[in-house]
């Protein structure tokens, strides 16, 4: 099954993606994680995107298309994938649809998670990300700062550069202006389902299970 999960930052995409992955053997492709890996490595791509990401701005479409093309053509993506964080603009959506047409694939489900801005800002304010595996921990949920990642056990939790309040507001704005049109594009060709992202991860997971 080929799934695209979309939604504003902090709505819980990554958490739900992990839950979907626990039940389906598909390739998990999260562009934010790929980009942060490049920044951490300090390679050419990383140098090009670091400042944009820290400001909550989008990485240029042509770079994103190169990344996604290379990734979708790898052997492990042949038997299904879950895309998280891509597409984020209408041109990326069109580029993805053309790419998939070219390799004889299609999107089976588009999941759009949404929640009110206030809830998102509150959640992101308490978010810690694991530098080693990408797992996200929410301080409001665990009640007190954890020292190690609950997924990989490493002591590598940090607050992302782009999780400051100002940047969060900007990322939300970018989502509403630029990513909604991308979702609409995909919805013209595939089954798009809107999911209420409020409540606990388990509640949201139930909603998703009901539509997959
Ligand atoms: P979140 O959903 O929490 O905002 P991501 O980890 O998906 O975060 O993305 C972090 C940042 O990486 C984005 O704010 C943007 O700068 C960059 N990025 C990720 N995916 C894309 C994309 N498809 N197009 C452009 N920029 C992207
Ligand atoms: Zn980890």
Image (spheres, rainbow, N blue to C red):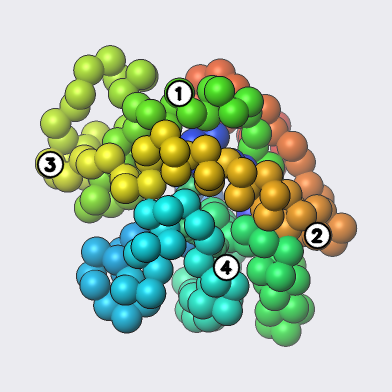
For discs 2 and 1, the disc positioned in front in the rendered view: 1
Question: Is the residue under label 3 in contact with that under label 1 (CB below 8 Å)?
Answer: no
Q: Can residue 26 be seen in this view?
A: no
| Element marked by disc 3 | loop
Question: Is the residue under label 3 in contact with that under label 4 (CB below 8 Å)?
Answer: no
Residue at left offset 52%, top offset 38%: 169
Whether residue 47 sits left or right of residue 81 in the image: it is left
Residue 163 percent coordinates (x, y): 38, 40
Q: Give the mark, 1 or 3, whose residue is nearer the N terminus.
A: 1
Front residue of this view, candidates 63 and 207: 63
Res 96 quadrant in image = bottom right
Residue where numbered disc 4 is placed: 79
Q: Residue 185 carries which label?
A: 2
Residue 17 percent coordinates (x, y): 50, 45
Res 111 quadrant in image = top right
Residue where numbered disc 1 is placed: 122
| Element marked by disc 1 | helix
Residue at left offset 51%, top offset 77%: 63
User: In 3D space, how far apart are the residues under numbered discs 4 and 1 (Cα atoms)?
Assistant: 37 Å
Residue at left offset 70%, top offset 75%: 95
Front residue of this view, candidates 144 and 17: 144
Residue 107 percent coordinates (x, y): 72, 61
Q: Give the mark, 2 or 1, whose residue is nearer the N terminus.
A: 1
Residue 113 position (above or below residue 64)? above
| Element marked by disc 4 | loop
Quadrant (top left/top right/bottom left/bottom right) for the C terminus? top right
Residue where numbered disc 3 is placed: 155
Front residue of this view, candidates 183 and 167: 167
For discs 1 and 3, the disc positioned in front in the rendered view: 1
User: In 3D space, how far apart are the residues under numbered discs 1 and 3 (Cα atoms)?
Assistant: 24 Å
Local crowd size for mark 2, using a 10 Å CA cut-off: few (<14), some (14–19), many (≥20): some
| Ligand 2 is within 8 Å of the C-beta of the residue at disc 3 | no
């Amino acid at each position: 099954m080929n799934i695209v999960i979309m939604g504003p930052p902090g709505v819980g995409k990554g958490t739900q993606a992990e839950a979907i992955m626990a039940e389906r053997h598909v390739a998990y492709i999260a562009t934010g994680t790929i980009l942060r890996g490049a920044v951490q490595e300090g390679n050419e791509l990383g140098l090009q995107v670091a400042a944009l990401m820290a400001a909550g701005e989008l990485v240029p479409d042509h770079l994103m298309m190169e990344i996604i093309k290379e990734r979708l053509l790898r052997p492990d993506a042949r038997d299904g994938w879950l895309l998280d964080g891509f597409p984020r603009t209408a041109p990326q959506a069109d580029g993805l649809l053309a790419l998939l047409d070219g390799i004889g694939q299609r999107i089976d489900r588009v999941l759009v998670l949404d929640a009110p801005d206030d809830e998102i800002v509150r959640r992101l304010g308490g978010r810690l990300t694991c530098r080693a595996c990408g797992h996200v921990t929410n301080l409001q949920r665990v009640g007190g700062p954890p020292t190690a990642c609950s997924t990989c056990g490493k002591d590598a939790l940090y607050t992302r550069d782009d999780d400051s309040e100002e940047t969060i507001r900007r990322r939300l704005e970018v989502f509403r202006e630029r990513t909604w049109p991308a979702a609409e594009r995909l919805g013209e060709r595939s089954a798009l389902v809107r999911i209420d992202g409020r409540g606990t991860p388990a509640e949201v997971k139930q909603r998703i299970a009901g539509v997959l």
